[in-house]
Image (spheres, grey):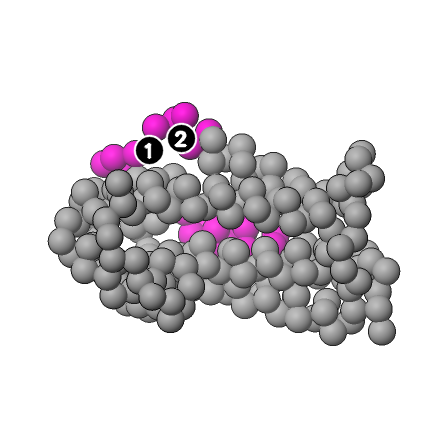
Amino acid sequence: PRMHHPSPLYRHLIGALWFAFALCWLVAALGNKPTQRRESPGSRLIHVIALLLGAILIGWHDMPWPWLARRLWPISFSGYWIGLALIAGGLGFSVWARVHLGRNWSGTVTVKQGHELIRSGPYAVVRHPIYTGILVALAGTVMISGTLRAIIGLVLILAALLRKMRTEERFMLETFDGAYERYRAEVPALIPLAKPRRSAPR
């Protein structure tokens, strides 16, 4: 059967998963290593603005512009539960990667003092498992929303994450040199089992 739109109860389940993810993130941020090198404030601002705009488009149900709320596909009960499974699985994968990264993690593009190149756990599957998990969870959220605004929001967040990923790759190449180049040649960036990119970023 089709759902014209997810009921408040169903939306609360989605919100609860994202809230639990955010809470885990805040707790895990405690005790990070001191920062040795950081991206510029301007670069960080561009990233944050794109993420906020994307999140607002995906999560805000009462948009003042009706055309943004246009539904592109109907949502069914099975589609809802598949989307919810993607959200739970994607966020779980991101949390696993964050915990596995330990004190080397940072919300901004940084190089920590005593920074380690992590290649085990989820980092043996993809080089940016946190982004992979977030994008899978966002895809599940968009699948349930089925609206134009959600698609636009996903594109904005994807662009922001790809931009940040390129900056991180440059930092890692400069910090770990040949070791990170070998890692890039062996492990794909975002999609498991995809062919890794072998050329260094410019």
Which is more toward the observer, 23 or 159?
159
The residue shown at (78%, 45%) is 69
Instruction: Quickly name the residue at label 1.
Output: 39
Residue 148, horizontal then vertical, whole percent: 72, 47
Image position of 166 (left or right of 11): left
Q: Find out whether the residues at labels 2 and 1 contact each other: C-beta distance under 8 Å.
A: yes
Residue 13, horizontal then vertical, whole percent: 70, 61
Which amino acid, mark 1?
Glu
Residue 201 is covered by the magenta coloring = no
Element carrying mark 2: helix
On residue 130, the disc is: none
Residue 28 is covered by the magenta coloring = yes
- Against 12, is 152 above or below? above
Image position of 31 (left or right of 183): right
Instruction: Quickly name the residue at label 2.
Output: 43
Residue 12 visible in image? no
- Against 163, is 195 above or below? below
Q: Quadrant of residue 166?
A: top left
State which region is magenta: 16-45
The residue shown at (46%, 29%) is 45
Residue 103 visible in image? yes
Q: Quadrant of residue 171?
A: top left
Which is more toward the observer, 139 or 60?
139
User: Where is the C terminus found, in terms of image quarters?
Assistant: top left
